[in-house]
């Protein structure tokens, strides 16, 4: 089983990460994708990937951290390129657009949206250069994010992580080779529309994730999430789709295999 999106570098895990990995192994996980959200985050993510054989990493700047990049500055890409040379890096992310949070000091809503789009475009360009796929964040920005990512189809594939949209939203992305990913939200009692999406999308078009330490699935909603709990989401989706847990696990493992495989030869990390 694969947890395709885990924030293992979170401060919430600083005291018991070995135990968290042990519980993940006991739950049957064979791979965890540890997601970076900032340049500051990247060394910690890579250190975790080095420590645990089943952990792989992505590197990138989250849209809420886009203010760490100066206007029109592209030098941050050189830093990301350096981190991406690590042999356990399997994607660029978490990147995207976030219109939910208020703009930071010094930005209007419009300049903040434009700056996020600039930082995203630079990272999409890097992903295409390195032949790595991207992990995409959307919050109240779906139309703009899809419009920016879809022109990259055929050069870069994206997974729209923590997907909460409809089948109508998902299918145009899937038809262009992109993926969606389901978190514990799909197990919530008020998640009927998302559950319909999970029933309807084709095999091979989605992955499973925790987004831990956030969004723990039922029956653990409201508690700290961790990779072992992705099994609850897998069981729930198996039931929705009329499949066994083993079938959903095999399908989503294969999808993750194909998505998180760098096409470029690995470069030794100094």
Image (cartoon, grey):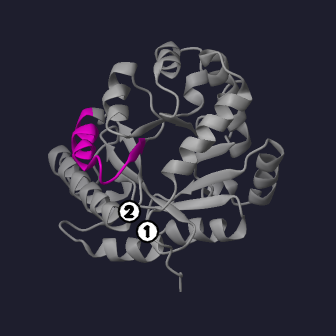
Q: Could you tell me residue 244's position as x and y percent?
A: 72, 23
The part of the image, by quadrant, that contains residue 190 is top right
- Tell me if label 2 and label 1 are in contact, CB under 8 Å: yes
Span colored in magenta? 143-159
Q: Nearer the viewer, residue 111 or 200?
A: 200
* Callout 2: SS: loop
Residue under circle 2?
A: 131
Q: Could you tell me residue 141's position as x and y percent?
A: 29, 36
Tally of numbered discs:
2
Q: Earlier in the sequence, mark 2 or mark 1?
A: 2
Res. 221 in view: no
Indicate whether residue 158 is drawn in magenta. Answer: yes
At x 54% / y 42%, what residue is drawn?
255
Q: Nearer the viewer, residue 185 or 106?
A: 185
How many neighbours does mark 1 have within 10 angstroms: few (below 14), some (14-19), or many (20 or more)? few
Q: Could you tell me residue 219's position as x and y percent?
A: 72, 24
Q: Is residue 246 above or below residue 23?
A: above
Q: Could you tell me residue 247's position as x and y percent?
A: 68, 29
Residue 200 left/right relative to 67: right
Which quadrant does the N terminus fall into? top right
Residue under circle 1?
A: 264
Res. 120 in view: yes
At x 63% / y 55%, what residue is drawn?
8
Q: Nearer the viewer, residue 34 or 65?
A: 34
């Amino acid at each position: 089983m694969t947890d395709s999106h885990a924030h293992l570098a979170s401060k919430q895990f600083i005291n018991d990460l070995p135990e968290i990995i042990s519980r993940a192994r006991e739950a049957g996980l064979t791979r965890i994708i540890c997601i970076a959200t900032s340049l500051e985050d990247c060394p910690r993510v890579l250190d975790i990937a080095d420590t645990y054989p089943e952990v792989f990493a992505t590197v990138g700047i989250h849209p809420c951290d886009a203010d760490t990049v100066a206007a029109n500055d592209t030098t941050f890409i050189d830093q990301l390129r350096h981190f991406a040379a690590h042999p356990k890096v399997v994607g660029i992310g978490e990147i995207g657009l976030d219109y939910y949070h208020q703009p930071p000091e010094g930005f209007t809503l419009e300049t903040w949206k434009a700056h996020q789009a600039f930082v995203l475009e630079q990272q999409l360009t890097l992903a295409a250069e390195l032949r790595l796929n991207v992990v995409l964040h959307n919050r109240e920005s779906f139309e703009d994010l899809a419009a920016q990512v879809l022109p990259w189809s055929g050069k870069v594939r994206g997974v729209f992580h923590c997907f909460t949209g409809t089948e109508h939203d998902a299918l145009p992305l899937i038809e262009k080779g992109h993926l969606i990913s389901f978190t514990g939200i799909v197990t919530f009692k008020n998640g009927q529309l998302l559950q319909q999406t999970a029933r309807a999308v084709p095999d091979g078009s989605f992955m499973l994730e925790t987004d831990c330490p956030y969004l723990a699935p039922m029956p653990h909603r409201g508690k700290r999430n961790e990779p072992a709990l992705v099994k609850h989401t897998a069981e729930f989706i198996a039931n929705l789709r009329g499949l066994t847990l083993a079938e959903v696990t095999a399908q989503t493992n294969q999808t993750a295999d194909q998505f998180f495989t760098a096409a470029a030869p690995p470069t030794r990390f100094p």
